[in-house]
Amino acid sequence: IPEYAFIGRSNVGKSSLINMLTNRKSLAKTSGRPGKTQLINHFLINKTWFLVDLPGYGYARVSKSAKKTFQKFITEYFSKREQLISAFVLVDIRHNPQPVDLEFMTWLGEHSIPFSIIFTKADKLKPMAIENHINSYRDILLETWEEMPNYFVTSSSKEIGKDELLQYIDDTNSNLKID
Ligand code: GDP
């Protein structure tokens, strides 16, 4: 069964997004507390793919050794996953591009792991500001990448981006069967 991994900094809105995608109100726990999602959770969606919930990274108050442990952990996850089709890197649409996110995307690229970006909490900004923020990401990403990575704009509180995201995964899965 194909797997899609969801990952991002703590508090980016990952649990809320997972709840939106799985139609549950409180399956993945949303937390005010950082680092609460400790383990990898798998959610079987439509009996056709696994949504893999990875722990949040890059929380500022985490110690250096905790960061190392996390790095080892994700490195192990990504090196073992034969069913992994693609990762989704979540970033808060309100924030400017953060080194930890950019480094992580570069790391995925170096390991030939396909990924898309998910801009979360889109309801917090006006459309014009969303466009500006995506453009600043584009400018920075184009220093490393030949083209802007695939991306989605979502809001879990306003149910924005859900259908596109699920459709994209369905399409990707259909293409896998043809190949
Ligand atoms: P996680 O730590 O990445 O799993 O993030 P959570 O899903 O627990 O969300 C962190 C905080 O952001 C919570 O207070 C959520 O209510 C809030 N949040 C998450 N998604 C959205 C969204 O789409 N819009 C708004 N306005 N707030 C959100």
Image (cartoon, grey):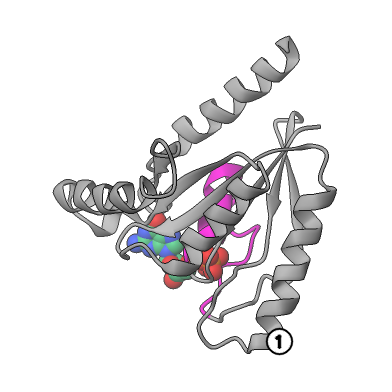
> Toward the viewer: 112 or 42?
112
- From the top left corner, tell me how far across and down residue 150 is, in percent: 45, 36
| Residue sitting at x 56%, y 59% | 104
Residue that carries the numbered disc 1 in the rendered image? 65
Q: Is residue 148 above or below residue 98?
A: above
In this view of the protein, can residue 108 be seen by the observer? yes
- In the structure shown, which secondary structural element does the residue marked by tag 1 occupy? helix
**Magenta stretch containing residue 25, yes or no?**
yes
Left or right of residue 174, residue 124 in this image: left
Q: Quadrant of ligand 1?
A: bottom left
Which part of the image, by quadrant, shows the C terminus?
top right
Task: Name the amino acid, label 1.
Answer: Ser
| Residue sitting at x 66%, y 66% | 55
In this view of the protein, can residue 25 be seen by the observer? no
Q: Which residue lies most toward the left here?
A: 128
| Residue sitting at x 61%, y 39% | 114
- From the top left corner, tell me how far across and down residue 77 is, in percent: 79, 56
> Toward the viewer: 74 or 124?
74
Magenta residues? 12-32
Q: Which residue lies most toward the top here?
A: 178
Q: Quadrant of residue 25?
A: bottom right
